[in-house]
Amino acid sequence: MNILKIGDKVTDFSALDQNSNEIKLSDFRGKKIVVFFYPRANTPGCTAQACNLRDHYAELKKSGYNLLGVSADSVKHQLNFSNKYNFPFPLLSDEN
């Protein structure tokens, strides 16, 4: 597995978010973005990670950052996870 470093270029990708909207990385070109990956929604560690980002979301936005969460969960699972914890950022489904 390749480990990304700050400043590394990432290949464009697209995925559906929890509301079945297509989100493309290129939509954020020229903007600051944090993409966080988690193995599975509603597990203790993933929930803690996502809730911490939710709790600091206003600070991130104030600093100009956009936020995307990505896991292998289905769109339906992402929607349930987002609704349960009131996440203000998109959760992308990458079932492949």
Image: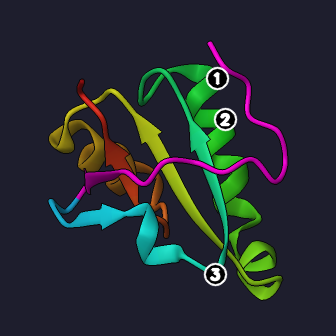
Q: Which residue is mark 1?
A: 45
- Answer yes or no: do the residues labelled 3 and 2 have beta carbons within 8 Å? no
Q: Is residue 9 left or right of residue 16?
A: right
Specify whether 57 is left or right of 50: right
Residue nearest the viewer, comparing 89 with 64 = 64
User: Where is mark 2, residue-wise?
Assistant: 48
Q: In the rendered structure, does residue 28 fall within the stretch colored magenta?
A: no
Left or right: 9 in relation to 92: right
Quick one: SS at disc 3?
A: loop
The residue type indicated by label 1 comes to Gly
Q: What numbered label is drawn on residue 30?
A: 3
Q: Residue at x 81, y 54 (%)?
A: 7
Asked whether the beta carbons under mark 1 and mark 3 sit within 8 Å of each other, the answer is: no
Q: Specify start and end residues of the magenta stretch as a single range.
A: 1-18
Which secondary structure type mostly characterizes the magenta part of the structure?
loop
The amino acid type of the residue labelled 2 equals: Ala
Of labels 3 and 2, earlier in sequence is 3
C-alpha gap between disc 3 and disc 2: 29 Å
The CA span between labels 1 and 2 is: 5 Å
At 61% from the left and 43% from the top, the residue drawn is 36
The answer to whether residue 95 is left or right of residue 28 is: left
Q: Residues within 10 Å of mark 3 (few under 14, many from 20)?
A: few
Q: Nearer the viewer, mark 1 or mark 3?
A: 3
